Image (cartoon, rainbow, N blue to C red):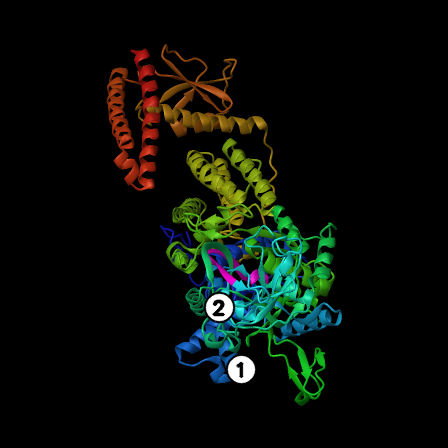
């Protein structure tokens, strides 16, 4: 015999160096024009660091789909790539420079960009290594980056086309401002968190009559930019003061008192100060009444020269100092604690400042309306899996606001807009101005999501008319988390519809978030993050992949549970041991399956194999990977390992060479198909086993998906095998219960519900005898019978001379006494308030579980005692 499998499964040995061989052989390179194309573009990870468990989950799902489609005969392009991640990467490079004692301003834009590219190369290399560890079947010949030349050209073209159609404009509006990164943010880059703050009530003196108004604010530091005071025109309390002026206690300026029905008369004092440059609602009022819009804050969140002695202070430092001064001056009416939702930058974590700024915007309504219209056309709509997420997608598009796309960064796509230094004329174009010395390019770059929104088609070569674009667009399936439906899925939908007049992908498979075993989101602050590379080192990529993709249904979150990864590892070990057994039986020659010589057991396992093939294929096509995993786990562990391999031990020692040959062929055939079924989930170990067995192809990566095996079998034959297996279980249970030795011969009778004897075929009887030392007889000459309901029959067992009932009674009484003591102990603990209230909840639950188990065992043992005592 040639190569033998190792006695023990060792994931480190199995997974070592195998991926590089696959890449060198070109197994994942697309382009077989004889096949139907299938394309997936990877959601590009940010080059800001290493991959996390969410990436591992997301990419493993994609890999499973791509490997499955290759086996089904498709020309699969799984296109890899990475995202430059503007704000996040710039923050990382800034931090690295800070460690060196310098800033980006010290080295200038060009040198900073060189450092950013160095960072990109460093982390892109790490990400590729991690993709390899995961075994991802990516076509690296087509790898892209959101800042490569081709994508830069695509970005510029879309910007120019949107601008020329009047869908991009520049304007002053209130935007979300990140004072740490010193850049604008879009609405969906802001996370709202409930924090404890204060509502400050201040007194404003009316100039004309000396009356005091009390006005509330949560942000006193913005008072230096107040331009007016508003009341409701129908509010009788304030009608007489409209047109008067009140003194701003922050700077002594007289503010006009105006009326507008925007004011809520039921909220607070129903008097509102208007700070146009620091609040979106105030901005709208200022536009309506043509108020000035001064800004009292610097881009870094410090107060500017408008703020007098507070200039230069941090915004929150200014708040505290101003309130303290107001208290001393008697301006404070009262202060209330106030829980409110406050926007935080998703990238830097700082509180976002609503801030008036000149930025570039995309006019979103026309773009969104086109996507929504096409969602009603079957061959143009994006199909969401699960369907409920389409509502999330469409509701956001229906309520969309214009998109602020400019960022005050250096790392990113520079906005292709220039201002003439003399005339102020704006030029937007694909090419730089011909006389660049007379033009100043906009300093800003584009929001990262602008370029990643083009990912589905720009990666295939657009705006050039490439062969890949023609063949693989629109792509087939996008796999992504529900948390970026707004960020990315929606952006790809309207950007692709605008540029390509098509959908970016046909299906979107949505998954959830990976959480810890307590259901908490993984984060640095909680210290509950898991590095997938550590898991791979300890348990193997195959175990991690199988766990990630078979423990959650589409759209649902996944709880990380180490015990379930152990369970996956044990499952792989079970397959390994089964494969070793099969390898020892078949040797180096590939056995040929002859469907004319199949035994009852052979027909049963091949029928199950056909059933599993049908179910697995159906559920793979429906993206139900957890259902596939459960089906395969049950088939491999129960049907193949626990039953057919055990049954084969009876037939492999047959004196009939045809029976032996048939058993070997079925063992081999079913195992090879199991490897094919599982190879998308666990590519390393299935490849190792495949190559250790006699095989047709040079790699499992180029194998085809199993096909239905035709053979003659009747329903009666299948039911007979099911009955025999059920009978074996029943006999083993009876022997165990009554302490009968497993090798003791026993007489049984299989009968229908109408008490008709069921004769077994020679095959079936041989299996029953071999597996549990039972003989099926038409008549049982015994007055001591024991019956069990089994599959398709009733099994009756002759118990005469098999059981010493007196001895059995003694054993059962002893066991009942033990269980009663355990129940008494557990009940006592659970009645003890000191234990229930002070012990960890997990410990209390363990005791409850133990008590329930003891009570269940006691009831079963008492029934057994009753049965035995009836025999005495």
Compared with 46, 659 (above or below) is above
Total number of numbered discs in the rendering: 2
The dominant secondary structure in magenta is strand
Compared with 767, 171 (above or below) is below
**Residue that numbered label 2 is attached to:** 48
Q: Nearer the viewer, residue 572 or 464?
A: 464
The picture places residue 197, in percent across and down from the top left corner, at 46, 58
Q: Which residues are magenta?
A: 187-203
Q: Residue at x 49, y 56 (%)?
A: 193
Q: Nearer the viewer, residue 772 or 731?
A: 731
C-alpha span from label 2 to label 1: 19 Å
Using residue 596 as the reference point, say whether residue 843 is left or right of it: left
Q: Nearer the viewer, residue 486 or 686?
A: 486
- The answer to which quarter of the image holds residue 84 is bottom right
* Residue, far front: 209
The earlier-in-sequence mark between 2 and 1 is: 2
Tell me the quadrant of the picture where the C terminus can be found.
top left
**Residue 191 on the magenta span:** yes
Q: Residue at x 58, y 36 (%)?
A: 596
**Residue that numbered label 1 is attached to:** 109
**Residue 463 on the magenta span:** no
Tell me whether circle 2 and circle 1 mark residues in contact (CB < 8 Å).
no
Q: Nearer the viewer, residue 325 or 337?
A: 325
Give the SS element for disc 2.
loop
The picture places residue 345, in percent across and down from the top left corner, at 51, 64
The reply to whether residue 76 is in sight is no
Compared with 226, 808 (above or below) is above
Using residue 682 as the reference point, say whether residue 488 is left or right of it: right
The picture places residue 300, in percent across and down from the top left corner, at 50, 73
Q: Residues within 10 Å of mark 2 (few under 14, many from 20)?
A: many
Q: Residues within 10 Å of mark 1 (few under 14, many from 20)?
A: some
């Amino acid at each position: 015999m040639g190569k033998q499998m190792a006695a023990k499964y060792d994931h480190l040995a199995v997974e070592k160096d195998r991926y590089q061989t696959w890449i060198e052989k070109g197994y994942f390179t697309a382009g077989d024009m004889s096949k139907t194309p299938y394309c997936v573009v990877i959601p590009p990870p940010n080059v800001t660091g290493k991959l996390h468990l969410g990436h591992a989950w997301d990419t493993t799902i994609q890999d499973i789909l791509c490997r499955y489609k290759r086996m089904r005969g498709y020309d699969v392009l799984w296109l890899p790539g990475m995202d430059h991640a503007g704000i996040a990467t710039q923050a990382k490079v800034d931090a690295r420079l800070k460690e060196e004692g310098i800033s980006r301003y010290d080295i200038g834009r060009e040198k900073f960009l060189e450092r950013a590219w160095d960072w990109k190369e460093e982390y892109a290399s790490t990400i590729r290594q991690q993709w390899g560890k995961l075994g991802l079947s990516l076509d690296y010949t087509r790898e892209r980056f959101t800042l490569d030349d081709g994508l830069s050209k695509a970005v510029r073209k879309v910007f120019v086309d949107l601008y020329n159609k009047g869908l991009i404009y520049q304007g002053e509006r209130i935007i979300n401002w990140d004072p740490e990164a010193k850049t604008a943010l879009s609405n969906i880059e802001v996370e709202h968190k409930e924090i404890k703050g204060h509502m400050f009530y201040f007194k404003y003196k009316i100039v004309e009559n000396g009356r005091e108004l009390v006005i509330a604010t949560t942000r006193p530091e913005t008072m230096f930019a107040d331009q007016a005071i508003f009341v409701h025109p129908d509010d009788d309390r304030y009608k007489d003061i409209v047109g008067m002026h009140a003194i701003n206690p922050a700077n002594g300026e007289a503010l006009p008192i105006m009326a507008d029905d925007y004011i809520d008369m039921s909220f607070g004092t129903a008097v509102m100060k208007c700070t146009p440059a620091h609040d979106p609602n105030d901005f709208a009022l200022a536009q309506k009444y043509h108020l000035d819009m001064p800004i009292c804050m610097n881009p870094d969140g410090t107060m500017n020269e408008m703020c007098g002695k507070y200039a230069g202070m941090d915004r929150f430092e200014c708040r505290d100092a101003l309130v303290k001064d107001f208290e001393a001056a008697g301006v404070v009416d009262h202060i209330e604690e106030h829980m409110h939702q406050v926007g935080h930058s998703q990238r830097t974590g700082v509180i976002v400042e609503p801030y008036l700024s000149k930025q570039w915007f995309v006019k979103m309504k026309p773009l969104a309306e086109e996507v929504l219209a096409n969602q009603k056309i079957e061959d143009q709509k994006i199909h969401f899996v699960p369907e409920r997420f389409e509502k999330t997608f469409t509701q956001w598009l229906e309520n969309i606001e214009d998109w602020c796309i400019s960022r005050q960064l250096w790392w990113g796509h520079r906005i292709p807009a220039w201002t003439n230094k003399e005339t102020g004329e704006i030029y937007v174009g694909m090419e730089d101005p011909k006389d660049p010395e007379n033009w100043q390019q906009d300093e800003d770059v584009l929001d990262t999501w602008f370029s990643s929104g083009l990912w589905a088609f720009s990666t295939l070569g657009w705006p050039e008319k490439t062969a890949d674009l023609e063949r693989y667009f629109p792509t087939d399936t996008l796999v992504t988390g529900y948390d970026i439906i707004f960020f990315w899925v929606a952006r790809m939908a309207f950007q692709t519809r605008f540029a390509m007049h098509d959908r970016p992908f046909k299906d979107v498979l949505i998954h959830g978030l990976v959480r810890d075993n307590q259901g908490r989101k993984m984060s640095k602050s909680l210290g509950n993050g898991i590095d997938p590379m550590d898991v791979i080192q300890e348990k193997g990529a195959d175990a991690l992949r199988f766990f990630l993709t078979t423990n959650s249904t589409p759209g649902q979150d996944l709880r990380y549970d180490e015990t379930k990864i152990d369970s996956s590892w044990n499952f792989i070990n079970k397959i390994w041991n089964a494969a070793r057994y099969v390898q020892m039986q078949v040797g180096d020659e590939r056995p040929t399956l002859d469907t004319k010589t199949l035994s009852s057991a052979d027909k049963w396992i091949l029928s199950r194999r056909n059933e599993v093939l049908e179910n697995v294929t159906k559920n793979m096509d429906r993206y139900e990977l957890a259902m596939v995993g459960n089906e395969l786990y049950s088939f491999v562990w129960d049907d193949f390992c626990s039953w057919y391999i055990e049954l084969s031990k009876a037939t492999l020692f047959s004196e009939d060479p045809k029976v032996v040959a048939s058993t070997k062929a079925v063992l081999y055939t079913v195992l090879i198909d199991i490897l094919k079924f599982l190879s998308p989930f666990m590519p390393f170990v299935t490849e190792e086993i495949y190559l250790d067995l006699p095989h047709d192809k040079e790699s499992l990566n180029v194998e085809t998906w199993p096909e239905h095996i035709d053979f003659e079998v009747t329903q009666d034959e299948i039911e007979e095998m099911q009955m025999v297996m059920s009978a074996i279980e029943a006999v083993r249970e009876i022997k165990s219960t009554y302490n009968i030795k497993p090798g003791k011969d026993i007489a049984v009778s299989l009968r229908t519900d109408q008490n008709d004897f069921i004769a077994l075929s020679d095959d079936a009887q041989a299996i029953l005898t071999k597996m549990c030392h039972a003989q099926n007889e038409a008549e049982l000459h015994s007055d001591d019978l024991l019956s069990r309901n089994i599959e398709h029959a009733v099994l009756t067992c002759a118990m005469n001379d098999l059981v010493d009932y007196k001895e059995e009674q003694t054993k059962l009484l002893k066991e009942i006494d033990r269980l009663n003591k355990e129940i008494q102990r557990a009940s006592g603990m659970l009645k003890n308030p000191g234990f229930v209230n002070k012990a960890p909840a997990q410990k209390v639950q363990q005791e409850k579980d133990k008590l329930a188990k003891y009570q269940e065992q006691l009831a079963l043992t008492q029934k057994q005692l009753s049965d035995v005592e009836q025999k005495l």
